Image: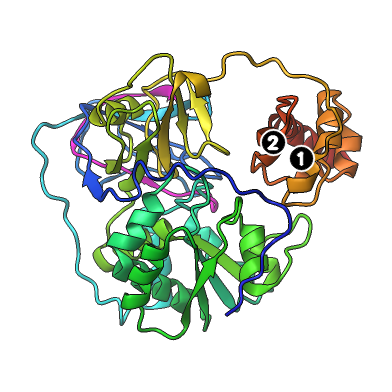
Amino acid sequence: MEVKKFTGGISIPHYKSFTEHKEIKEASLPGELIIPLLQHTGAPNEPLVKVGDKVKAGQKIGETDKFVSAPIHASLSGTVTAIEPRSYLTGQMVNSIVIAVDEKQDELELSDVDVETVTKEEVVNAIKEAGIVGMGGAAFPTAVKLSPPPDKEIDALIINGCECEPFLTCDHRLMLEKPEELLRGIELIMKMLSVDKAYLCIEDNKDDAIEAVRQKNTNPQIVLLRMPTKYPQGSEKHLVKAALDREIPSGGLPFDVGAIIQNVGTCVAIYEAVRYKKPLIERVVTVTGQNLNDPQNLMVKIGTPIGHLIEECGGIVKEPAKVVIGGPMTGKAQQNLGVPVVKGTTGVIVLPPDMAIEDMEYYDCVRCCKCVEHCPMLLYPNQLSIFCEAKMIEEADEWNALDCIECGICAYVCPSKRPIVQLIQRTKPLIREMQSKK
């Protein structure tokens, strides 16, 4: 099947060689877990435990009755030592459950369910009870995402295996090491959505992953698509365009054009939730970068401080270092290595001094239009940055600032070092506030 390219975007250095050939390894256990009560888009959880309680691995410790949410679980056994605000990857303080980890851990209790006989309702309940959210970074509650409005007819499932951000290889390794679990997870989602076609999209810089999945795939309804390596190929708007030749309207979502998108890590987690009733208490994290002694792909318990992972990988080579959670294009730089891994954490990147920019001075737009040339949403980031910087909210809205997917290409290519995407990010809430008052 021919796969069409999207307009805009950019080819950027991969920096994946540090970890793409390294198998997933179990991270050592931390002495303390910090489990935020909000790790997803939507409503925060309320704690189900109190200080002094003993908890077991897999035990539900936070929940809410709000629809858009996902429960949280203890990823290891231990004792609750605090329920208090702790540093989060966004720089905010988020109410968190702190657990002192037991030195001796009991084996996680798992069920054994026949996935061939489960009903749609059982799949939904298993996903919800496991607290699964989108593991590509967005962290939207999966049970909600897989329950589209009744008036939205879904006929296609798209699986995002592109992993287009530089440095990250956690999805790549999952496809190589767990292709059967991935495929069974895709089939469960197809069953839940009652769709006849699923499209597994993998960029062509991961030919070994494409081959690994192809060899295990016996289902003709799961179609493998070899995508051009181009950032941001993994964006849902561009995946839908490339895989189905459908365009999501401005302000719309994939279900508006009959599609649902899931990340490969989420598919594996769904399989484990249905098959073993395993809650989402761990995930693969790529811990990498030129300023790290021994980059690795690690299976990490949710709540593990990122400083523990950096030490696990041999520590920092040279100070000062810039530590980013997520990919370098859309991730967030950190000041506190006590920030924990959460359900949407894809990577921890340790960059060297020459990439750890201290001077944040930027200059006026020189109208070179590089940002316009590469913008995958066909916007005018140069003009938007001027409006946003001047707090011209109505003008930014008229020039479709809300359509920005915050891929970061504009800031990456700007010769004036303008923080274009950051200016737009800062303005979006003001636009929404303005719109709500009209």
Residue identifier under label 1: 371
Q: Position of residue 257 (x, y in %)?
A: 70, 70
First along the sequence among labels 1 and 2 = 1
Q: Position of residue 127 (x, y in %)?
A: 40, 61
- Give the CA separation, mark 1 to mark 2: 6 Å
**Residue 71 colored in magenta in the image:** yes
Q: In this view of the protein, which residue sits in the foreground, 297 or 150?
A: 297
Rendered residue at 40%/54% (across/down): 171
Answer yes or no: is residue 99 visible.
no
Amino acid type for the residue under numbered disc 2? Val
Q: Secondary structure at mark 1?
A: helix
* Left or right of residue 50, residue 8 in this image: right
Q: In this view of the protein, which residue sits in the foreground, 391 or 207?
A: 207
323 in relation to 319, above or below: below
Rendered residue at 34%/30% (across/down): 97
Location of the C terminus (image quadrant) = top right
Residue identifier under label 2: 413
| Residue farthest left in this picture | 104
Q: Which scheme is used to colour this image of the protein?
A: rainbow
| Crowding at mark 1 (Cα within 10 Å: few <14, some 14-19, many 20+) | many
Rendered residue at 19%/69% (across/down): 112
Q: Position of residue 413 (x, y in %)?
A: 69, 36
Q: Quadrant of residue 302?
A: top left
Rendered residue at 55%/51% (across/down): 68
Are the residues tagged 1 and 2 within 8 Å (C-beta)? yes
Magenta span: 66-88
Q: Quadrant of residue 421?
A: top right
**Residue 271 colored in magenta in the image:** no
Q: Secondary structure at mark 2?
A: helix
